[in-house]
Amino acid sequence: MLDKKTLIENLTGVNSSKLNYYVELKKRNAEILKQNSRLEILHQLSRDINLEMSTEDMIERAYRQLHRALPCDFLALAMLREDRLNMRAVMPCKPRRLPNIPDDSFVWDVVRSGQASIHDPVAVSDTFFQTYPELAGELQSMAIAPLYKRAAVHGLLLVGSSQKKAYAREELSFLQHLADHLTISIQNSRLYKEVSRAQQGWEATFKAVTDPILLLDLDYNILLDNGRQMPDMTSEQGNNKGLKCYTRLYGRDMPCEECPMTTLKKDPKPVFKRLETDSGQVLDLFYYPVLDEDRRLTAVTHIIKDVTQKTNMEAKLMHSARLAAIGEMAAGVAHELNSPMTVIIGTAQLIHREFENRPEVREPLEDIVNCGLRCKRIIQNLLTFSRQDHLPMAETDLNEEIDRVLHLIYYQIDRNQISIVKSLDPNLPLTKANGRQIQQVLTNLLINARDALSGVDRDKVIEVRSHAEDSKEGQWILISVKDNGVGIPAKNLQRVFTPFYTSKEETKGTGLGLSVSLGIAEAHGGSLEVESTYGAGSCFTLRLPVRKDPAYDLNN
Amino acid sequence: MNLLPGGCPVNIRKFVTPEIIFGQGALSQIGESAARSGASKVFVVTDQGIIEAGWVDRALYYLRNAGLEYEIFSSITSNPKDLEVAEGVAHYLRSRCDALVAVGGGSPADSAKAIATLATNGGELQDYEGVNKIRHPLPPMVIVPSTAGTGSEVSQFAIIVDHQRRLKMSIISKSLIPDIAIIDPELLNTKSPRLAAATGMDALSHAIESYVSLAATPLTDIHALSAIRLIFGNLKRSVFDRQDAGANHNMAMASLNAGIAFSNAILGAGHAMTHQIDGLLDTHHGETNATLLPHVMEFNLPVCRQKFDQIARQIDEISHEQERKGDFSERAIEAVSSLAMEIGMRKSLADVGLKKESIKTLSQNALNDACLVTNPRDASAEDIEKMFLKAF
């Protein structure tokens, strides 16, 4: 019982006053300021800690900042893995080994209770300090906060001070905040790594594709592209440095007419289109819809595939097949003609022998025999031309092949009053070639030259030339067929080798000749070149390397 | 110098009052007063009787005029219970008020104080029972008394019944002194004669007990004596004519004076005992006081003859001749008894409804009441029991 005087003092309140809001306010203010500075530190930490940091670095950063908010001579992070507390980082002493925290240590109490707690003074005899003897002398008080992941403790944040009574309830709640914060940072960084790994995988896939891939939004903006060279979709020199697909690809200021985007917006199904560019490239355009969860169109994946080579090949195959059929027919006809011709020639020769002394009969008979023989040669050429099996490459005299072709089509050209000037190099080296195919090329070039001359008023001349040339890569044989016909407009010059491109009327040309010829030239390791002046004539040159070694087999 | 352990000389005393607004029609100041104390939404604590008398409507009118929002809480009975206070706190917090106004007798005033305490300090009322237990400042409080007696509008006391223990808890703290007391004698017009008599006797017991209190100082004495003089001069008129403006005015002033006196000088055995009976029986505090006061005075007489003598001199004109004869202390006791009788407040504890068996327990409990500390004569449980029995 207090003595009476004290009781009266208390009652009359000499030692007390009406509580003042100003004092209260100051107290609260001080608390708020302290809280603010702690929040600031948390904030600073969250700025310092970036996603690519390791957990160790995070703890190191936290340690450097933390002393401003609470006594901190030691900071450590332990993670719970399969009922073991792995020490992950210890600041500032950074022991070389980080043994697990023994499960009879007081540190474990926090894991079990799930509550942040203060240990003051720390029990130096605890197994924790036996495991980490370097801390035993240093720490007087510790505070430990649990790291929560989905309502379960998955780690601990430990802070220690060399002072006694360093931590109170407030510090503890700050520590818990920090622990929560670190949990988020650690999780974020883990998620970030996972996501970026996944993204890198996709990006590599995306970049590895050699065809251009674009991701377009519904407003024609290019969101992503895999950095591949876009083909020239148009010869028009527009501004193709835009974000819009129609600007970048087609140099336009507005969406293309019949843009597949319109179709996709109505019905989000993949769209395929084939486009032949002005420069003769054949492009397959694919438009794949990108849908959201509600199956609404959000973007379009656009893939551009250059299929020029593929279509050329296809065309060649078709042409070859057609030629093979014609060849077969021609072979049949030639074979059928061969027997009657033999009979005609034999019979004429017999009669000729009988009427040797009658010149009026003998001369016409000689004509019959000569023309018959010529027919036989033509038939022979036809048979050679149309031989089914691919002749393997053999040492070939190209001049001989030229002669053979000229023979074969002599009449077709002669009939049009065209003079053929032949200038063959008599010292032309032999080379490995397939004579049949060379004939095919030359026939083609000659027929084209003839056609180019139709409707020209001047003296029509086709010049066939052969010569050899030495270059760095070795010796080359050049066979050129030059006409003084209509020539080819410059803009069409690149297209002449495109399958099915033709300047002739439907009935006359298939548009395959030059493309097949180019294929043959390339198959021989050579090339087919064109020079032309519109209105003055063209010159096609077959350029073949001189090869003595066994050439490569076309059948392969 | 005689030093207490706290390092404070014995003769140092403290005197605290709130801002006091007194006068006919002072109720009109309620809006501005609340607004000045920083209120934006006021929690009005009152009771049904005051609402019916129309005073709350008047008060609300002035609150509205001052641009304040308000919330009314009137579920309060005489001798307010801790449960009612708990309900009030919940209501206060829920309605997001930031100040309290009490209009009424001691019950609304003490309830408002208790609600204010819990609103900023939290916990249970029992946590604050005793002296200086309040830790955080209370929201602004304005109290307008409607009776002339309790003195709660100026005091550091709040008396609330603990319904489980069935006793009155005294919460004593400087923080319970309201910020502003508005005393408008007009409000006394509407109370019943019986209530006027009871509250008048309450005020008288405040004045007499604080005057003889061990903690009395010259500052409190002035107020105590002034109250005694005014009560003896006006109580009867005030009881018999409710419309007597002069009597009401003086009784209001008397009650204020008594309140100021007892808030600073504390009370004595009388209040320590009445608190026990009120807690048990829910009787009117004033009536119990009137019944016990003469007996307590009698018990105290041996140690404060001089003070009782002074009291007697406030009551009667005492001639110089009589004065020379000296001691009029017993006259004071007689005067108190006869005043009580004249206004119908002289009863026995049996009339009030007390059972004889309870007296032992009550006497024991009274020892724990803070008011007993300042009683001029040390009282044991037996002493208290004897006084109870005399009044029985």
Image: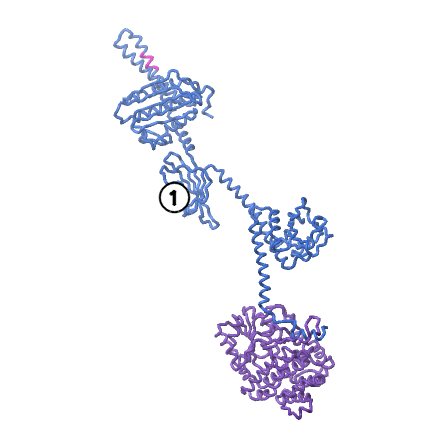
Does residue A334 appear to the left or right of B35 in the view shown? Answer: left
Are there few (<14), some (14-19), or many (20+) residues within 10 Å of tag 1? few
Q: Is residue A354 visible?
A: yes
* Above or below: residue B333 compared with residue A250: below
Which chain is in purple here? B
Q: Which residues are magenta?
A: A342-348
Percent coordinates x, y for residue A262 in the rendering = 39, 46
Q: Nearer the viewer, residue B371 or A227?
A: B371
For label 1, the SS is loop
Q: Main secondary structure of the magenta part?
A: helix
Does residue A541 appear to the left or right of B263 in the view shown? Answer: left
- The residue shown at (55%, 71%) is B99
Q: Nearer the viewer, residue A410 or A529?
A: A529
Inspect the image, locate mark 1, and give the three-letter code of the amino acid beneath it. Answer: Cys
Percent coordinates x, y for residue B238 in the rendering = 57, 87
Does residue B81 appear to the left or right of A256 in the view shown? Answer: right
Percent coordinates x, y for residue A141 in the rendering = 68, 55
Q: Is residue B158 visible?
A: no
Res. A39 image quadrant: bottom right
Percent coordinates x, y for residue A494 in the rendering = 37, 31
Q: Nearer the viewer, residue A531 or B127?
A: B127
Q: Nearer the viewer, residue A479 or A176?
A: A176
Res. B121 image quadrant: bottom right
Q: Which residue is mark 1?
A: A259
Chain to which the residue tagged by mark 1 belongs: A
Tell me the shade of chain A: blue
Residue A273 in magenta stretch: no
* Above or below: residue A426 compared with residue A517: above
Q: How many marks are shown on the rendered structure? A: 1
- The residue shown at (47%, 40%) is A226
Residue farthest to the bottom, as pictured: B321
